[in-house]
Image (spheres, helix red, strand yellow):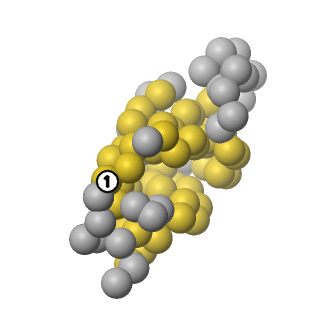
Amino acid sequence: MPRIYKYKLEIEDVQVLSIPKPATILSVIEQNHSPVLYAIVDPGSDLVRVMIYLQGTGESMEYVSHIQARFLGTVNTRVGLIWHVFYKVVL
């Protein structure tokens, strides 16, 4: 049965999450000074890899410009950093 799961993201340019499929990426918010991703998943299913890209305002888009990543949202952390979050599901 599908459930909504939360995944804490690291402050890194690129990271990989392994989450149960089918995964529906819902949103990203700030929680406890870190970006957090929410997704609808089926906990008993096989895993799929999701590439996450954090892009700072004004920074080069070298990690995002040549791939077909989807924009998820912008997170304003309490420490004053703004992150634009993109993702791409890979098999």
SS at mark 1? Answer: strand
Q: Residue at x 29, y 66 (%)?
A: 45
Q: Residue at x 54, y 60 (%)?
A: 25
Q: Pick whichever, 19 or 57, lies toward us.
A: 19
Q: Can residue 76 be spotted in the picture? A: no
Q: Can residue 47 be spotted in the picture? A: yes
Q: Specify the amino acid type for callout 1.
A: Leu
Image height of 41 relative to 70, above or below: below
- Point out residue 36 in the picture as x, y percentages from the top left corner: 45, 55
Q: Crowdedness of circle 1 by 10 Å Cα count: few (<14), some, many (20+)?
A: some
**Is 16 on the left-hand or right-hand side of 45?**
right
Q: Residue at x 50, y 26 (%)?
A: 13
Q: Residue at x 57, y 41 (%)?
A: 88
Quadrant location, the N terminus: bottom left
Image height of 56 relative to 74, above or below: above
**Is 23 on the left-hand or right-hand side of 58?**
left
- Point out residue 12 in the picture as x, y percentages from the top left corner: 44, 28
**Is 22 on the left-hand or right-hand side of 18?**
right
Quarter residue 29 falls in: bottom right
Q: Pick whichever, 73 or 90, lies toward us.
A: 90
Image height of 41 relative to 7, above or below: below
Residue lying at the far bottom in this picture: please name it.
1
- How many numbered marks does the figure carry? 1
- Point out residue 61 in the picture as x, y percentages from the top left corner: 69, 20
- The residue where tag 1 is placed is 47
Quadrant location, the C terminus: top left
Residue lying at the far left in this picture: please name it.
44
